[in-house]
Image (tube, grey):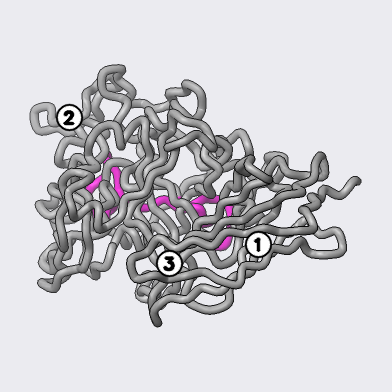
Amino acid sequence: MKMQKVLIGMVIMFVSVSTLAANPTISDVKVQQRWPWSRLVDIDYVLTCAPGESVDIVVEAYNAFQRLNLPDVSLSGDLFGVMRGARRIVWDPTVTTYTDNGVLPELRIGLTPIRPPLYMIVDLTQSEGEAGQTEYVYESALTNGDWGTWVRNPVTNDGTAVQSVVWTGVTNDMYKTDKLVLRRVSEEMFDMWDTPTTLTKGFYASVFQVTQRQWELITGGERPSNYNHPDYYAARPVETVTYDAIRGATNSVPVIDWPETGALVEPTSFVGLLQAKTGLSFDLPTEAQWEYVCRAGTTTVFNDGDVSANVDGTNADANAWLDKLGRYRFNGGLVDEGGVLKVAPRNSGPEYGTAIVGSYLPNALGLYDTHGNVYEWCRDWSGSSQSARTRRGGCWGAGASSATWEFRGSHEPSYTTYLVGFRLVRDLP
């Protein structure tokens, strides 16, 4: 088999830029392909910034005046949440179109330090590399009113404010359909099921459950959901989708079997198509990621921080605390016909069955519907048998006890049900 490789020019030009008011700077940039004949390109640099400060590094590459496309999957190393000191980014050109079909004789690399944004917006109607496909929302711009309404510290955990800034203007329909909005989450330690757990890398988590219009845009027109009334389907969560359809199956070629096969997904799966369309490393959340963003700094039964909330006794079914946080069987999930709760028909509007995403209160990270609406697939196997994948978060057809952050369920990855959908994360290197 012929080894793919790319030969960069003998003379490397580089650009170092700073756009921050406090003047973090990048210096001593060195770009060199590993030798002999390695595909990898090392980009070494030194970041100078305040002690304890962290920044993201934007990488731009040009061959002479032609801009090169550098998708997430082609870069690794010190890119996000970087602290001062000598650092390295690694570029793998063969993950892109830059293989031994050509030489890059005038490679220039630009490195720009930026403060981590609060939100990322991806336009799903555009293709990878198009101008404006990805936008970022920074706290300073948000609190200046540039992005509509916002609130500070909307959630208290047993009376103590959870420090956060939440973009409430994100409930505009375009952010639920043609665009995908995600919230930045930092790496951190937390107690998962009372076990200390460390998120070793930062990531982005989607503000809403993936909607039917978003699924349609990525798959080219598929509408698999049960509650797909043409007047209302677009901003309702996609459901009746399998884990296998979202990221790939263990019997596919190549084999897709997280965690053994890592971030590999089937190219024709939803996530595979989304990665190809955006160049970004999207995936289902791990259970640890899901639980962290659901709880969002709270330690209470639900993520509104109300210490009095519980699912004991009759509260395990109908629950006044959950009424405000998400769709479940007792606040519109099921239809009350003379005192008997029944499943709403397929052509129901969002007053029954699944709700329009973002119809209830957000948590401290600004995420919606982490309690209720549809269960959410996670990447993890459920238990040691490796026959079922985990789902979390409650749904429109179940009671309150199924919607707590502690509740775990599972299904075989090929199983379809109108009770389960998903939310996305973008993993950072």
Depth check: give the residue in front, 356 or 72: 72
- Mark 2 or mark 3: whose residue is earlier in sequence: 3
Report crowding for label 2: few under 14, some 14 to 19, many 20 or more residues within 10 A (C-alpha): some
Residue of label 1: 90
* Mark 1 / mark 3, whichever is N-terminal: 3
Residue, disc 2: 351
State which tag comes first along the sequence, 2 or 1: 1
Which corner quadrant of the image does residue 81 belong to? bottom left
In the picture of the structure, the residue carrying the numbered disc 3 is 55
Is disc 3 placed on a helix, strand or loop? loop
Residue 283 vs residue 32: left or right?
Answer: left
Identify the mark at residue 79; answer none if there is no mark.
none
Q: CA distance from mark 2 to mark 3?
A: 44 Å
Q: Are marks 2 and 3 in contact (CB under 8 Å)?
A: no
Range covered by the magenta-colored residues: 378-403
Task: Report the front residue among 361 and 203.
Answer: 203
Q: Are marks 2 and 1 in contact (CB under 8 Å)?
A: no
Q: Which residue is found at the position 32% from the left and 47% from the top?
A: 207
The x, y position of residue 155, in whole percent, is: 16, 62
Query: Which quadrant of the figure has residue 143?
Result: bottom left
User: Is disc 1 placed on a helix, strand or loop?
Assistant: strand
As shown in the figure, which amino acid type bears the numbered disc 2?
Answer: Glu
x then y, percent, for residue 177: 34, 31
Determine the secondary structure under disc 2.
loop
* Side of 10 where 377 appears, left or right: left
